[in-house]
Each structure stands twice: as C-alpha cells, then as structure tokens.
Image: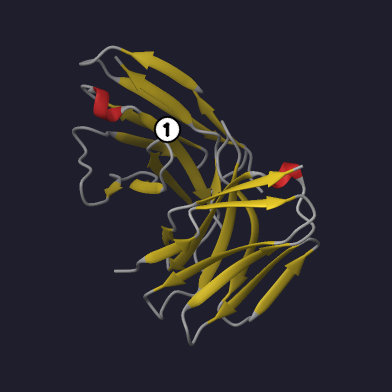
C-alpha cells in the first residue's frame, strides 16, 4: 500500500492563527481525503481533495475554515484557519487508489493543540 | 444516510483468549467492510476487509464475518497477544464514502 507522510506530526498553536498540514504520498493516487479525529472519538470526514479542482466538503465544514489544495496526484494540504481551542484534534490524511471495494490508507496524523 | 454502530466500546481479555467486536450498518447498499487498528500516536491501519459477496474471510489469527441479511459484521481475534491492544474501527462503504464505527478499545492482559 501507499506510504503516506504528514507534516507536522504535532504542533501547539495560538488561537487566531492558521496552520497548514501537508500530506505526501509515495505514489500517484486517485482520491485523497482529510479527516478529523477528536480525542477518543471516531473519524469524521472533513473533505475530499480533488486534483485540479475545488475540494468537496462535508456538512459542517466550510472552505473558509479548512481550505484544501491538491496540486497533483501525490500531494495535498489542509489549512486550519483562525484556530480556536475547539479545533484541537488529530487531523488525518487518507488515500484511496481507486473507487469500488478498495480500502483507504491513512497517514499517522497531525496532533494539533490550540492554546 | 449510512449509520454504523459498533460494540463494545471497551473490551478486556486475558492473553490467549478470543476477542469479538461487532458492527451493524443501516444501508443495504453498503458493499465493502474494512477493519482498522489504531495504536497510540498512529493512524488507523487496515487489518482485514470483506466484500459483500463473501460471508467470511480469515487471515491468520484474524477473521471477519458478514451477514448481509441482518446487516452486521464482526471481527474475531483468536489467541490474543498484548500487541493486539489498540483501538479497532469498523467501517461500511458505499461508493467513495466510508462510514466509521465509534471504535472499540481492546486491552489484552498479560
């Protein structure tokens, strides 16, 4: 399966600031996704990162707060904007090579704390 | 939309015993069911999956069963070892959407 690298692995940020998380894959993949995982909770899909077009956001997540880029088939970024303590969470990148009955593979996540 | 329920939320077993985690789903169109293991500080890792045209799949100590009629699927871990301790997530997939269960924290007591 693809090797997924996320940077940074963790960060502590001040409220009101923004942080950009990078996701690099070692092979070209069709689909890339961004998830949020609150401590001790399940995974919530933020958006699907579409190569060459705007990301598709899930209900409750908006582009102004979580802008996403996907310039090519191996790289994507998620920005968490104007952060508040409620944004403290783990942010996970995942990839899926193609649709149908195929798994998603996850990076190790970015652990974000907002003071 | 799809709703996936997972039980139990926590599970403790003695080393060598078996562990069973169960999930139910609501949408009969779901056709792919992966299981993930998440260790502390890591992302979820795929451990086994099953497609809707199969009733059971086994990989060494891990097996998954699927009952499409009842819309439930289960993860079975036999001869548990301390390194099996982790959080396990089930998921049900329709097309490109994955719907995750709420997770089971498994502790294997040496």
Q: Does residue B82 appear to the left or right of A10 in the view shown? A: right
Residue at the farthest bottom position: B69
- Vertical relation: B17 (above or below) B40: below
Residue B97, located in which quarter of the rendered image? bottom left
Q: Position of residue B75 (x, y in %)?
A: 62, 65
Q: Does residue B98 appear to the left or right of A55 in the view shown? A: right
> Tag 1, which chain?
A
**Residue at (22% x, 23% y) in the render:** A84
**Residue at (77% x, 50% y) in the render:** B15
Q: Position of residue B26 (x, y in %)?
A: 37, 75
Q: Does residue A75 appear to the left or right of A105 in the view shown? A: left
- Vertical relation: B37 (above or below) B68: above
Residue B33, located in which quarter of the rendered image? bottom right
**Residue at (35% x, 35% y) in the render:** A69
Is residue A38 in view from this perspective? yes
Residue at the farthest top position: A14
| Disc 1: which residue | A90
Front residue of A98/A111: it is: A111
Q: Secondary structure at mark 1?
A: strand
Q: Position of residue B92 (x, y in %)?
A: 46, 66
Residue A13, located in which quarter of the rendered image? top left
């Amino acid at each position: 399966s693809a090797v997924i690298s996320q940077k940074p692995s963790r960060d502590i940020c001040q409220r009101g600031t923004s942080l950009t998380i990078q996701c690099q894959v070692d092979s070209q993949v069709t689909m890339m996704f961004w998830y949020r995982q609150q401590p001790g909770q399940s995974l919530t899909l933020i958006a699907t990162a579409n190569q060459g077009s705007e990301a598709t956001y899930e209900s409750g997540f908006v582009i102004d707060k979580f802008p996403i880029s996907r310039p090519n088939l191996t790289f994507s970024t998620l920005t968490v904007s104007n952060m508040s303590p409620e944004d403290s969470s783990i942010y996970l990148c995942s990839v899926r090579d193609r649709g149908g009955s195929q798994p998603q593979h996850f990076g190790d996540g970015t652990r974000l704390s907002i003071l | 939309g799809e709703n996936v329920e997972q039980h139990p939320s926590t599970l403790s077993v003695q080393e060598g015993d078996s562990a069973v985690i169960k999930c139910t789903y609501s949408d009969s169109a779901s056709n792919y069911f992966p299981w993930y293991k998440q260790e502390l500080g890591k992302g979820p890792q795929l451990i086994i999956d099953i497609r809707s045209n199969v009733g059971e799949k086994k990989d060494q100590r891990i097996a998954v069963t699927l009952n499409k009629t009842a819309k439930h699927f289960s993860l079975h871990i036999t001869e548990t070892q301390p390194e099996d301790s982790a959080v396990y997530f089930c998921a049900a997939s329709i097309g490109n959407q994955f719907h995750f269960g709420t997770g089971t924290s498994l502790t294997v007591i040496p």
